[in-house]
């Protein structure tokens, strides 16, 4: 992963993120009969809440995975909190009745860790980058690998400079 200052910026407002999460729920509606959502924390918390509301899913579980890294490379992944065994055992224990939600798939490494836990779960993310895209079943928007997404919880209200710095009119 490159330094965010060296990447393309893609700021996402709360309104846009909410619309994109509802679009994800719309794409997921009718694709399966899920008994639970497993959200990958922390980024999956907000989209999981919106998808759960839209699809009427009441059982929401988390899997907590930390990536220790500098911005120039992704480090090793560590499962801080695994998925509750009761959720893993739903529908035979391979995840067929489980919808896994995250905000973004970047390299796909986090998704692979969770997919190993629930190999038949349906993986859905709001945004996907090309390297991680094969790890998800449903997503809303693809962005280039060199794009840094600024989620609404990462930003405050401030001026954003224009893409083109040419001010001569």
Image (cartoon, grey):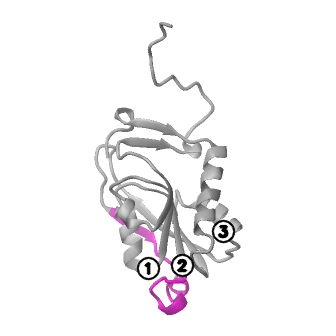
Instruction: Examine the rendering and report whether any part of residue 48 can be seen.
Output: no
Residue 85 highlighted magenta (yes or no): yes
Q: Is 95 or 3 nearer to us in this picture?
A: 95
Question: Given contact means CB atoms under 8 Å apart, are the residues at marks 1 and 2 in contact?
Answer: yes
Give the Cα separation between the discs numbered 1 and 2.
Answer: 8 Å
Residue drawn at x 51%, y 7% is 169
Asked whether 71 or 11 is in front, the reply is 11
Q: Which of the two discs, 2 and 3, labels the residue nearer the N terminus? A: 3
Question: Circle 3 — which element?
Answer: helix
147 within the magenta span: no
Q: Position of residue 103 (x, y in %)?
A: 51, 56
Name the spot of residue 138 as percent of width and height, x first: 49, 65
How crowded is the residue under tag 2: few (<14 C-alpha within 10 Å), some, or many (20+)? many
Give yes or no for contact between labels 2 and 3 (Cβ–Cβ under 8 Å).
no
* Of the pair 113 and 34, the residue shown nearer to us: 34
Q: Secondary structure at mark 2?
A: strand
Label 3, residues with CA under 10 Å away: few <14, some 14-19, many ≥20 = some
Task: Estimate the spatial distance between the alpha carbons at disc 2 and disc 3, rounded to whole Å.
Answer: 12 Å
Figure check: 6 above or below 2: above
* Among numbered discs 1 and 3, the one appearing first in the sequence: 3
Residue 89, given in percent of the width and then of the height, sits at 51, 89
Question: In the displayed structure, would residue 168 be above or below residue 22?
Answer: above
Question: In the rendered picture of this protein, how many numbered marks are placed on residues?
Answer: 3
132 relative position to 96: left or right: left
The range drawn in magenta is 77-97
Q: Which mark is residue 118?
A: 1
Mark 1 surroundings within 10 Å by alpha-carbon count, few (fewer than 14), some (14 through 19), many (20 or more): many
Q: Which residue is mark 2?
A: 98
Judged from this view, the residue extending furthest toward the bottom is 92
Q: Which residue is mark 3?
A: 52
Q: Residue at x 62, y 45 (%)?
A: 16
Residue 110 at least partly seen: yes
């Amino acid at each position: 992963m490159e330094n965010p200052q060296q990447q393309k910026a893609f700021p996402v407002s709360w309104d846009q993120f909410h619309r994109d999460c509802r679009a994800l729920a719309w794409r997921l509606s009718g694709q399966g009969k899920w008994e639970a959502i497993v959200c990958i924390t922390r980024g999956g918390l907000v989209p999981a809440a919106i998808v759960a509301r839209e699809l009427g899913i009441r059982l929401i579980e988390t899997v907590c995975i930390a990536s220790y890294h500098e911005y120039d490379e992704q480090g090793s992944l560590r499962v801080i909190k695994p998925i509750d065994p009761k959720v893993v055992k739903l529908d035979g224990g391979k995840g067929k009745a489980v919808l896994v939600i995250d905000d973004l798939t970047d390299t796909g490494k986090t998704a692979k860790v969770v997919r190993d836990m629930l190999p038949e779960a349906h993986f859905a993310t709001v945004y996907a980058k090309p390297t991680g895209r094969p790890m998800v079943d449903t997503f809303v928007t693809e962005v280039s690998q060199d794009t840094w997404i600024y989620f609404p919880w990462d930003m405050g209200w401030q001026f954003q400079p224009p893409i083109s710095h040419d001010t001569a009119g």
